[in-house]
Amino acid sequence: MIVKTIGSAVQGVEAISIVIEVDVSPKGTQFHIVGLPDSAVKESEQRIESAITNIGFRFPRFRTVVNMAPANIRKAGSAYDLPIALGLLAASEQIDSTALSQFTIMGELSLDGTVQPIRGALPIAIQARKEGFRGLIVPASNAREAAMVNNLEVYGVTHLREVIDFLLAPSTLQPVYVDTRTEFANAHHQFDVDFNDVKGQYTIKRALEVAAAGGHNALLIGPPGAGKTMLARRLSTILPPLSLHEALETTKIHSVAGKLPADTSLVTQRPFRAPHHTISHTALIGGGSIPQPGEISLAHNGILFLDELPEFSRQALEVMRQPLEERRVSIARAKLSVDFPASFTLLASMNPCPCGFFNHPVKACTCLPGSVQRYLNRVSGPLMDRIDLHIEVTPVPVESLLDHTYGESSKDIRERVITAREIQTARFNGYKGIYCNAQMNSQLLRKVCRLNSEGEDLLKNAMQKLKLSARAYDRILKVSRTAADLEGSEHIKTEHLAEAIHCRSLDRQDWWDK
């Protein structure tokens, strides 16, 4: 007897329905799984046999063929245990198969029949709704995540026996219901850090406000102990809150990667990812034999913080160049190609030299001649070209550290950032894929960042006297446009240009000659 159950395979951040056909025939005793299964799928026979026998059912000892279609898609992982087990029981006529075709079913089985969590429940639920299935049966720990998809009955189960009882008597289980919009609205955006903890550093805080308002990539450069990492970890507190669409998109990526916390059904805060500098380029960009999202995709709609930027491997840094421009990463393998979203704000920090005290106002640099330039050359020009703000961080005077007054809070700064982003949203309405000033192309740049004669003279003199590189030109215009938006100004003023020019430290010749 042939019985069909429905599972799902996740490729990239999307799911594809998998038809699992089970044929039990008395003509033999062998067990076969076909349809391009990996080792984890092939090993399911032993897990399923133990689970079935331990709940009082009979594992069929006849010739059994399990076909997973379409056969050209690689089937990976142990999440197919549950649909295969139900298919075996139905094909051997131990349970009724009538309701099986109405549900997408996924779950890993323990030897005692307990259903274990899976990855990618959210994209699986989206695909199940798209294909018109009545419902989705998943492990109970994944049920709230899957239930974020409306108009789909989602049933969370903890044991194989539960599923069998449900198929025989549907009233034994109730669908999990989640009001997505209410849950998102009730999310608390609380942070453990705040900008009012920062003593001094007013120009640095202003530069980070500009970075947050325009979505600009930024580099903090300064000596050890100046506060680079402390400032960087507070940038996420002033970013605009996620929209519901962004939250669902971010949740889907974390679900596929298995990074979604057990007690979380929706990512409501912008991600802040800070990988160690020993990370491989594959872990950073994503990949593997079965491609999985890397750190740049896990930072989608949030911040990727690279501390001690020159200490990262050259290969790891260079693979980020294309994603920084295209805001997605394409990973190609022999039999498949997947795209992962990667729209993130790059925030990096670094010392100015190996000893860390080049240009320090008090301590002398002890590096050998030429070592400073070699150290900074670890970060390539093309990558530096994609960083809009070069912010020099200087040590905080002791008087500021002893000051017991609090500075401006993250909440107040965030309100200005949100207002500036709303201006940009209205400006770029109708331009696909452009939501903030940092994403402007050359055509939009000429249209949006027009300068008066005074501004043109200022920029021309700055380019010549400060010996700014040509690559700094576009970045200065974008940053000055954001500074104007923060002020609510329709036009770019000379003070906005001056602020943007000041934030190109590594392009200024005088910085090297200090």
Image (cartoon, rainbow, N blue to C red):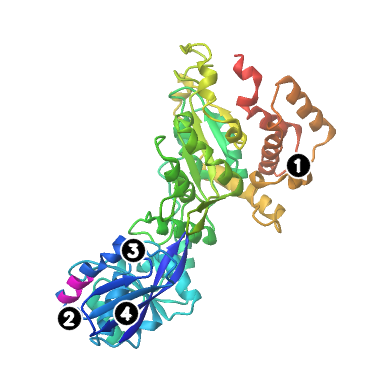
User: Quick check: 272 above or below 128?
Assistant: above
- At horizontal 50% and vertical 53% (from top left) the residue drawn is 332
Look at label 4 and name its amino acid: Val
In the picture, measured across the screen, residue 445 lies left or right of residue 199, that is right
Structural distance between the alpha carbons of marks 1 and 2: 73 Å
Report helix, strand or loop for mark 4: strand
Structural distance between the alpha carbons of marks 4 and 1: 63 Å
Look at label 1 and name its amino acid: Cys
Which residue has dot 1 on it?
449
Closer mark to the observer between disc 4 and disc 1: 4
Q: Foreground residue, 128 or 454?
A: 128
Quadrant the C terminus occupies: top right
Residue 265 pos. (x, y %) = 39, 62
In the picture, measured across the screen, residue 412 lies left or right of residue 180, that is right
- At horizontal 48% and vertical 50% (from top left) the residue drawn is 297
- Give the magenta range: 48-53
Q: Neighbour class for label 3 at 10 Å: few (<14), some, many (≥20)?
A: many
Closer mark to the observer between disc 1 and disc 2: 2
Which residue has dot 3 on it?
118
Residue 109 pos. (x, y %) = 25, 68
Q: Neighbour class for label 4 at 10 Å: few (<14), some, many (≥20)?
A: many
Q: Neighbour class for label 2 at 10 Å: few (<14), some, many (≥20)?
A: some
Structural distance between the alpha carbons of marks 4 and 3: 22 Å
